[in-house]
Amino acid sequence: MTQTARILVLLPPNYLLTHALEQAARKIPVEILYGTESPHHFSGQTRNIILKLRFRETDKLIETVRRHHRNHPFAAVLGVDIETTWLAALIADTLELLHHPIPMLEALRFKHLGRQKLLDAGLPIPRFFQFSLQDDPDRLAQIAPYPCVLKPTFLSAGRGIFVAENAKAFHSAFRRIREIVAQAPERLRAGRHGDILLVEDYIEGKEIVVAAYLQNREAKILNLVDQQIITDHPALRLTLYTAPSRLPFSYQQLVERLLSRTIRSLGFTRGPLVARFRINDRGLWLLDVLPVFFFSPTARLVQFPGDQSLEELWLREMLGEFPPLPDPLPGAAGILTWSLTQPERVDSISGIKAAQQVEGIEEVSLIIPGGKPMENRCLGFILARGKKPEQVEQALQKARNRIHIRLAS
């Protein structure tokens, strides 16, 4: 009897979309196993096998996966954010499986290396400066441009990113980043890059997220998404994504052309990617681009005919099937996400059933996270669909007003 193919998916502790991968896997069919440092974070989220893996020690991680591979081979190893995608590529390389080019992933994993690569390619990016977390913050605060963005170079999913309007805010952000970096489990893997601080000009303007998929080095844009940050609580950040973008068509063409240049410069060849741009009266700016899509909420906005999904397409491609990429279905969609901006505990979340009853709401997924409190942990999302972005946004705002999140503090 032929064994079902197995795919190992590496997960960071704050990933919420395992059910989408499992739904796609059942259609193929393929068996999904998860690997994570924190299995308890997913115990109530999935019934799939969860392997406890030590991401901190790369050599031991690879050897543990090789041992499982010898008993029952994996057909592919995947990640869902840049850190786990890099680890997956290291593992897949030793198992002689498909993976993204490791040098490209390393350049994107460490933000200062990625910025330099984009600068060398002549792409429009924010002006940036590279400092050390061991430097004197008084001296750095005197020479930093304001407003500016401070970020450690090796953390993903928005962790440790702060905007400073003045020297006092710079000091506060510098101190918090030092604390976050010291506690980050990825710090050991980052090596000499772990102490580097990236300081960038803050670019004002409208933010656009582009979801695309590459086959044979050719990118197909799946949607352009308007992004809006909503902050009405010091410890909570709400992010609203709506598609299709309401950006004028001429600006959308500029975004598409810049995305094509970016893909050629970085050497992307295949699979999903997500890129962020900001546009203002001075022009169009590339903020970041990553060869991962499943960690991005914008993945949920794409719908294909016949209940196909991005997860299914990517899993099939990793199995060597290379299916044709269908055109997304028309219509509007939006997603509203909640994340913690401070290491807070969540006491309760109420109003979920009431939010689900709002017309146009397709899914409400909010959970109380377990484990140690940490900043930038996603609590969940509300997904809505409709005919126009304006209708979707109204439905999300109405549903949002029915959700009540109580923090321990």
Image (cartoon, helix red, strand yellow):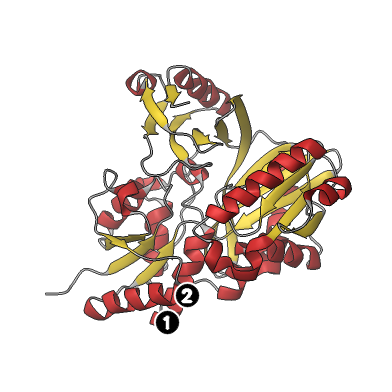
Q: Which residue is mark 2?
A: 90
Q: Tell me whether circle 2 and circle 1 mark residues in contact (CB < 8 Å).
A: yes
Question: Residue 175: horizontal and vertical position, in percent?
Answer: 67, 45
22 versus 363 height, above or below: below
Q: How many marks?
A: 2
Q: Is residue 81 left or right of residue 68?
A: right
In the rendering, at what x and y percent does residue 27 appear? Answer: 27, 55
Q: Nearer the viewer, residue 145 or 135?
A: 135
- Compared to 93, does 16 lie above or below? above
- Badge 2 marks a residue whose secondary structure is helix
Badge 1 element: helix
Quarter in which the N terminus is drawn = bottom left
> 163 left or right of 138?
left
Q: Is residue 79 left or right of residue 159?
A: left
Please give the name of the residue rendered at 62% of the width and 36% of the height, measured from the top-left corner.
227
Please name the amino acid that badge 2 sits on. Answer: Leu
Specify the quadrant of the image occupied by residue 148.
top right
Residue 103: % across, % down? 61, 75
Query: Residue 63: which numbered mark, if any?
Result: none
Residue at image mark 1: 94
